[in-house]
Image (cartoon, helix red, strand yellow):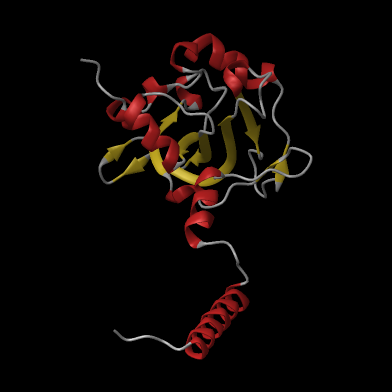
């Protein structure tokens, strides 16, 4: 049987230590990759030390669950929300929704707003997206928002660019009340308006 001498073992140990140190120096990260990935999955958004939500990044690579619009010209010229609402859901929460049909603690829904642009296209008349106009978020967190209905908090970075870099949660009456009155049976989310969510939810047997 081949055996390494004590001197060889010490030498190889030193080489391994040097390689590890160089890796850390080059990357600036001492956390194992798997642990870093788990942390990223657990925190799709970031908060400041005083509890404000930082403007989300990378959400356009999340699961796109659908889009709604209530245009002005179908609502007496003064719709409450005349923009297109493109909604994205963080991938980990979507995977849980596929399994259980429930919105897990930590679910993040991002609503990106865009104006109505052209109303004509080669395919016919309709409503077509214009420019991006705003950004909003809904987050379910039973610890951070334990006093909010359903543990959901709602944030708006504005309906006009440039958007705010960080914002406090909206007052409960501003958003929660409408969700509680019209979507409480499905955990405060208007799931019925998004076919991707309807298709993803487990079918009852």
| Foreground pick, 1 / 190 | 1
Q: Position of residue 143 (x, y in %)?
A: 65, 27
Most extreme residue toward the right is 50
Most extreme residue toward the front is 1
Quarter where residue 81 is shown:
top right
Residue 128 appearing in the image: no
Q: Vertical placement of 86 versus 58: above or below? A: above
Most extreme residue toward the left is 205
Residue 23 appearing in the image: yes
Q: Position of residue 50 (x, y in %)?
A: 79, 39
Q: For the point 54% across and 46% down, which residue is it?
A: 132
| Foreground pick, 192 / 45 | 45
Indicate the quadrant containing the N terminus: top left, top right, bottom left or bottom right. bottom left
Indicate the quadrant containing the C terminus: top left, top right, bottom left or bottom right. top left
Q: For the point 45% across and 26% down, which residue is it?
A: 103
Q: Position of residue 91 (x, y in %)?
A: 42, 42
Q: Vertical placement of 169 versus 167: above or below? A: above
The number of discs equals 0
Quarter where residue 201 is shown:
top left
Q: Vertical placement of 118 versus 176: above or below? A: below
Q: For the point 55% across and 12% down, which residue is it?
A: 180
| Foreground pick, 16 / 114 | 16
Question: Left or right: 173 with respect to 104?
Answer: right
Q: Position of residue 9 (x, y in %)?
A: 49, 84
Question: Left or right: 120 with respect to 70?
Answer: left
């Amino acid at each position: 049987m081949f055996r390494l001498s004590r001197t060889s073992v010490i030498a190889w140990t030193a080489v391994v230590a040097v390689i590890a140190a160089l890796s850390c120096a080059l990357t600036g990260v001492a956390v194992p990759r798997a642990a870093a990935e788990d942390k990223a999955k657990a925190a799709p958004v970031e908060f400041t030390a005083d509890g404000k939500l930082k403007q989300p990044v990378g959400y356009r690579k999340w699961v796109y669950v659908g889009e709604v619009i209530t245009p002005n010209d179908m609502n007496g010229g003064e719709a409450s929300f005349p923009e297109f609402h493109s909604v994205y859901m963080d991938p980990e929460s979507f995977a849980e929704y596929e399994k259980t049909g429930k919105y897990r603690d930590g679910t993040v829904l991002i609503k990106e707003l865009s104006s109505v642009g052209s109303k004509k296209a080669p395919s016919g008349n309709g409503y077509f997206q214009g420019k991006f106009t705003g950004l909003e978020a809904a987050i379910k967190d039973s610890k951070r928002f334990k006093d909010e209905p359903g543990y959901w908090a709602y944030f708006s970075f504005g309906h006009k660019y440039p958007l705010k870099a960080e914002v406090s949660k909206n007052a409960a009456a501003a958003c929660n009340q409408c969700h509680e009155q019209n979507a409480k049976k499905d955990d405060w989310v208007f799931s019925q308006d998004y076919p991707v969510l309807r298709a993803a939810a487990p079918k009852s047997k």
